[in-house]
Image (cartoon, rainbow, N blue to C red):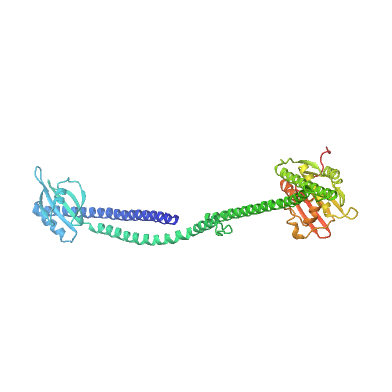
Amino acid sequence: MKFATKIILGTWMIMALCFSLGSLYIVRNNFQFSYDSIIENKQRQHLVNRYSLESDVRGKVEEEDDFSIKLVEKCVKKIEDYGQEDTGVILTEIKEKAENQIFYKNIGTDKNILDFIKTGGVIHYEVYEKDEKHYLLLASLIDFYGDKIKIVNRYDISTIFAERDRQLNAFIKADIIGMTIAFFLLFLLAHLLTRNIKKLSTVSSEIAEGSYGLRTKISGNDEIGELSRNFDRMANSIESHIHKLERDVKAREQFVSDFSHELKTPMTSMMGYSQLLLGDSLDKEEKEKALGYIYSECSRLQKLSNTLLKMLGILEETITKKWIYTEWIGEQLEKICLEEMQKSKLVIEVENKQIYTDVELVVTLIRNLVNNGDRACSTKESDEVKVLGKMDETAGKYLFFVTDTGCGMEPKEITKITEPFYRIDKSRARSEGGSGIGLAICSKICQFLDIEMKIESMPGVGTTVCLTFPEAKDIQNPKD
């Protein structure tokens, strides 16, 4: 059963039950009020009849000085002449050790009336039904000079029962009409309220089938609107992760392709030269040249494998951060990089502060940037690589700038330069033994240490790499 159908039937049944119970309660209260009122009214009327009869009989006895049953009948007829059409009168003489004898009546008697007459003499009443009508019987005793007479009045009270039935019928009709209208209104309301749920279901189904760009975009401040916004945020997150996974897969495929290409070229060359060496067609000089080429290609493959192992080592390395002095980093770079510089001069200017980071990874990071800058230069006489470190007092961060005056690169190349095996000038990189993984390693180190790396470059002018360390402070303790 659908949720909208559950809402319709559940609400409709509750409304029908409440409306029916409310209608019955109103009818019952109205009837009870009318019933109590008419009983009280007829009791007063019966007492008036009794006192009138008793007063009239006693007055006649005082005038004629003679009491008889005939006198009672005469007085009763006189009371009837005043007109009480809905009133029946029965007079019964009560004698000891004998049945009650009816000596006057203006209505027919039946078993209900006869049974009622036999009851006690205290004023009481009884209601019974006959021929689809309801009657009220009232009785009381009158003592006339030792003779006891019971006066019984019958009143037709069918009107209050007819009114009750009329109200019940009216409420039943109103109930049927009202609940029919309520059903259709609930149908419209339920479908109006659940259309957004249907939209959520449709969109989630289509997203599950691969339409990751779909969103519910349901406005509103209710629970469904909040659910829609949370669902859209979840879908955005899922789409982002899926795109990331797709990019990672493509990057892995490209990595494997580039790595295979890096291995294929030297391996093909070495196989060719090896076949030539196995033959007798080469002279001594050509054999030495072939052996030299094979050795150089083997050396390049060794460097490539070492670089890959280094990259994997960074991925598996446990980061140990501590407060270190930037001046010490500059000293380490000067010791390591001065001997490696081949095409440029190295200039290091570092403002001594403290940064919270991993020492070994930071040195590796800046060393790779310095080596890349050196490869981009031409000669030591005209080019230089400069390492500048300074504190950004406003932001509370420390900045390292690695600037070279080399060949530079186009802006479109900057976004690709950190991809593994990517080279701007592939022929120059291979001739210099570059693997195209240096900046990829730098990018990974920055990710692990929460360092922001920004690259700016201009062809023919040079390249500047800015490293921003988020946790830095002034020197507080003596240097270890």
Where is residue 325, by image quadrant? top right
Which quarter shows the C terminus? top right
Q: At 38% across and 62% down in the image, what residue appears?
A: 181
Side of 227 where 268 appears, left or right: right
Q: Position of residue 32 (x, y in %)?
A: 29, 53
The one of 177 and 339 positioned closer to us in this rendering: 339
The one of 467 and 113 positioned closer to us in this rendering: 467
Instruction: Identify whether 164 is placed above or below 471.
Output: below
Q: Where is residue 252 in the image (x, y as percent from the top left)?
A: 67, 51
Q: Hey, which residue is sitting farthest right in the picture? A: 381
Q: Position of residue 400 (x, y in %)?
A: 80, 49
Side of 440 where 172 appears, left or right: left
Side of 108 where 213 appears, left or right: right
Q: Hey, which residue is sitting farthest top in the picture? A: 480
Which quarter shows the N terminus? bottom left
The one of 292 and 327 positioned closer to us in this rendering: 292
